[in-house]
Amino acid sequence: SWYLVIAHFGYRPDLGHFTEARAAFFPLYPLGIRAFSSVGVPAVLGGVLISLAALAFALYGIHRLTTLELASARRRPLSRDRARDVARLAVILTAFGPMAFFLSAVYSEALYLALSIGVFYAARRGRFAIACVLGALAAATRSAGLLLVLPVLILYLYGPREDRAPDFARTARRDQPPLRHVGVLAGLLADLRSAVAPRYRVRRDALWLALFPAGLLLFMGYLALGGGDALAPFHAQQDWGRQFAGPLTGLWDAASAAFQGAHQLLSFQQRHVYFPVAVKDSPAIAASHNLVDFAFLLAAGAALAGVLRRLPFAYFAYVLAALALALSYPIATEPLMSLPRFVLVLFPLTIAIACWLAERPRVRVPVLVVSAAFMAVSAAQFATWHWVA
């Protein structure tokens, strides 16, 4: 409903605190809905069409990207056919994930997912102009879109890249007898310097990276020129109970909420509340939400280890930064609110899970069946106006 209101009425920053909550929803997706409405398409249908089209591009892109990465991996590369099998599994996991129904709803998840996959694929092919344009659009779609500059910068400097060979080869010291004191330290420093030194020379095309914040800056400029606060997209998070509580503070809050949530459900009573909840919420429902959120966090953490093992470091850095951002802005009543939906667009986790399932054929079907069943239940709850994520 927020996107529909913005598409129809705009942000109206001149109305101050009456409309400042809208600034939490970035403009690219509602602009698309408004474009459909201008030609007579109902706004809800226009939003669904945008999501479905973006989902189609996302599924195609994740297949191409997974095949590229696994077939050209430096460690344990797969054959082209085997890489395609894993890519098909990644597509199925994306389409039938527990929260995949958001990818066809009037939400910006599908659009952001398609843009972020496009950013990675273009950067991997060395087409940094395209990657940075898509990155600017992603930053105009969600607040976390600006994080995509981190993997693009890593791929630019360190690779792997398909457009050209590295300018600087990694140099490793030959085996030497143990050195003492200063010699050992000098050798370690030399190894460290070799490990962190860029493999690609900075060229003129690095200027394209300046495009990344363009989407966000244009949004902020629009709000300021409209009589509002240029920083409203960040201040608006407070209207939803989010505020910076320190790096990764939400991790402890989430673990505490999950533990107290389990205590709440196992107590089989509603009078005593073990974890503070909003007045309108049932303690049991709030407890189940916190448990589900924490389960998704644990699953994301396990999959993150697979990302580090099977994909280039840029993928790991992106997911780690995105999770760190979410864990640094907890909500008092539900520390990890919306985390299941947030994890949905972190596609490297899906690729890592696909790799894990590909190596274990016996658990593949049960995992997919449980995931699809979870999606069906979540979609039914969402369709009957219950809070899901």
Image (cartoon, rainbow, N blue to C red):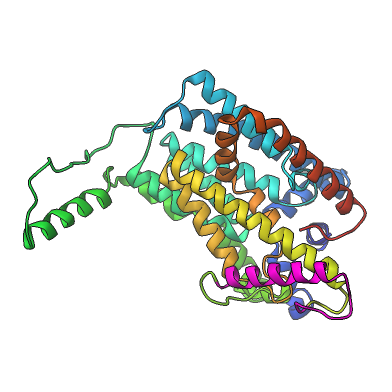
The answer to which image quadrant residue 217 occupies is bottom right
Name the quadrant of the N terminus: bottom right
Q: Quadrant of residue 58?
A: top right
Q: Nearer the viewer, residue 347 or 281?
A: 281
Q: Quadrant of the C terminus?
A: bottom right
Q: Position of residue 321 (x, y in %)?
A: 50, 58
Which residue ends up furthest to the front in the rendered image?
267
Q: Find the magenta span and give its range.
A: 249-276
Residue 202 relative to residue 150: left or right: left
- Residue at (57% x, 38% y) in the render: 351
Residue closest to the eye, 265 or 195: 265
Q: Is residue 271 magenta?
A: yes
Where residue 235 appears, as percent x and y from the top left, is: 64, 76
Please report the residue visible at 69 percent of the width from the left and 40 percent of the height from the top.
Answer: 54
Vertical placement of 323 versus 201: above or below?
below
Q: Residue at x 47, y 30 (%)?
A: 70
Q: Is residue 145 left or right of residue 25?
A: left
Can residue 114 be seen?
yes
Closer to the camera in the image, 288 or 341: 288
At x 75% / y 52%, what residue is drawn? 107
Q: How many discs mark residues in the rendered view?
A: 0
Is residue 363 depicted above or below 16 in this figure? above
Q: Is residue 234 above or below residue 374?
A: below
**Residue 339: % across, % down:** 67, 59
Q: Overall secondary structure of the magenta stretch?
A: helix
Which sits in the foreground, 374 or 243?
Answer: 374
- Is any part of residue 12 visible from this angle? no
Instruction: Say if the magenta span includes residue 299.
Output: no
